[in-house]
Amino acid sequence: MNTVPVAGAYPAPVEELRLRTRAFIRGTVIPAEPRPGQALNLALRRELQAAARDAGVFAPHVPVEFGGQGLAVEHWSPVFQEAGYSPIGPAVLNAMAPDEGNMHMLQLIGSDGQKRKFLTPLAAGDISSCFAMSEPHPGAGSDPDALATTAVRDGSGWRIDGHKRFTSGATFASFAIVMARTRADRESPAGATMFLVPMDTPGVRIGNPIHTVDSYLPGGHPNVHFDGVHVPGSAILGEAGLGFKYAQVRLGPARLTHCMRWLGLARRAMDIMLDRANTREIFGAHLSQLGIAQDMIAQSVIDIETSDAIIAKCAALLAVDAKAGSALSSVAKVHVSEAVYRVIDRAVQLCGGDGVSDGLPLAQYLNEVRPFRIYDGSTETHKWAIARRTASERRRAVEAGEPFQGAARIYEGER
Ligand SMILES: Cc1cc2nc3c(=O)[nH]c(=O)nc-3n(C[C@H](O)[C@H](O)[C@H](O)COP(=O)(O)OP(=O)(O)OC[C@H]3O[C@@H](n4cnc5c(N)ncnc54)[C@H](O)[C@@H]3O)c2cc1C
């Protein structure tokens, strides 16, 4: 299903980049897609990335000074959706998680030296990275306060100890952004601190793989162990003790770009569903003319359009108010992660047996998007946060003088 841009919604250069990206994904990337269930191999990724540079579509979100297309956050969605139309498109364009979120954070809070050392090669696609936050029980998962990995001052630097898991891309990463608990001292408050840790630092060890249902990210999401890892003071990203705050800086846009990419894949599933429904004849009609199938098609259009709208609103808000945009990204994340799953699941259903075979890529798409309802905050965690935030905003508004609307009125004669 095509993105239908509202005329004038985006400046002409953004629309041109969207069209270039669309042509590149359809003409070059889709013909090179691996079989469903297989990861994009690194040699092919490099080859396609070179072609993306030549086509002028590489790294759309990266500033021009770092070799990207310099798109502002409010213009990412149309281009990211075109990239996501192929499950390998975002990796080819160097706009894939976790690298894309790490680039954004390095750009915002990295020192000049950190940008030179880590952001420049990452943005160029010469290296990859990972983000190490989640831990086994009783450590951090849905509840970041349970963070168990520690970093303590050690001479002029820090010593990191901990066990991370589900660390996407760690196997081939050159460095990790590691979240560790740090104590209060004269220089910083107690809390969490982010460290830039090269993966070849002594004490960093890739542990057992974790076999998940998705497959396109090379190396998957393994365990990673940090045993007595010594890093210099310059490894701190931003300031010590502010890690939880920075995680929100990363997660707001990173959640939203996941929504954009996966919405692109839902559009692909929709096209597969429509092409089948328009051509498959059963019970004397095309599938697309049977009422129950029409309901599934219409519900999918509604899911896609509402997702597109909330992403656009959230991206516009992020551009002017990072805190409010980050709060709305919770709403967008819940809606889009559930909606894209529904769209792809309906496409599987309407394609019958082929839908669950590897003759069509739909079952694999379902596997690719399923974890998105869990990572970057599960649906339930976000709903919990949304409800708490909304209730407390209303309470504060009433305390500040908004008329209270909750008193039941007693009408005359009803006492
Ligand atoms: C494919 C994949 C890639 C990932 N990549 C990374 C990565 O690169 N880096 C990283 O650090 N982590 C990564 N993760 C980990 C991911 O962030 C965690 O799995 C997620 O935060 C949930 O934590 P948990 O698995 O410990 O589940 P738990 O914290 O045990 O939560 C389990 C379930 O509890 C429910 N729940 C949560 N909160 C509430 C609530 N308030 N009320 C009611 N129910 C609730 C939800 O259904 C949730 O799924 C990845 C995970 C997957 C599956």
Image (cartoon, helix red, strand yellow):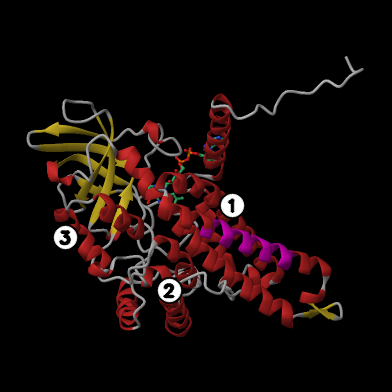
Q: Is mark 3 within 8 Å of ligand 1?
A: no
Q: Nearer the viewer, mark 1 or mark 2?
A: 2
Q: Is residue 135 left or right of residue 225?
A: right
Name the spot of residue 109 as percent of width and height, x first.
25, 49
Q: Quarter of the image containing the C terminus?
A: top right
User: Which residue position is annotated with label 3?
Assistant: 116
Q: Secondary structure at mark 1?
A: helix
User: Which residue position is annotated with label 2?
Assistant: 14
Residue 61 picture quarter: bottom left
Name the spot of residue 256 as percent of width and height, x first.
46, 55
Vertical comparison of 299 with 12: above or below: above
Sequence-wise, the earlier of marks 1 and 2 is 2
Residue for point 18% across, 51% down: 111
Nearest the viewer among 41 and 384 is 384
Residue 300: say if magenta: yes
Secondary structure that dominates the magenta span: helix
Residue 203 picture quarter: top left
Residue 150: say if magenta: no
Count neighbours of disc 3 (C-alpha within 10 A) and say few if under 14, some if 14 to 19, many if 20 or more: few
Q: Is mark 2 within 8 Å of ligand 1?
A: no
Res 232 visible: no
Res 310 visible: yes
Q: Are marks 2 and 3 in contact (CB under 8 Å)?
A: no
Q: Quarter of the image containing the N terminus?
A: bottom right
Q: What residue type is disc 1 on?
A: His
User: Which residue position is annotated with label 1?
Assistant: 335
Name the spot of residue 245 as percent of width and height, x first.
34, 39
Q: Farthest residue in the top direction?
A: 415
Vertical comparison of 152 with 254: above or below: above
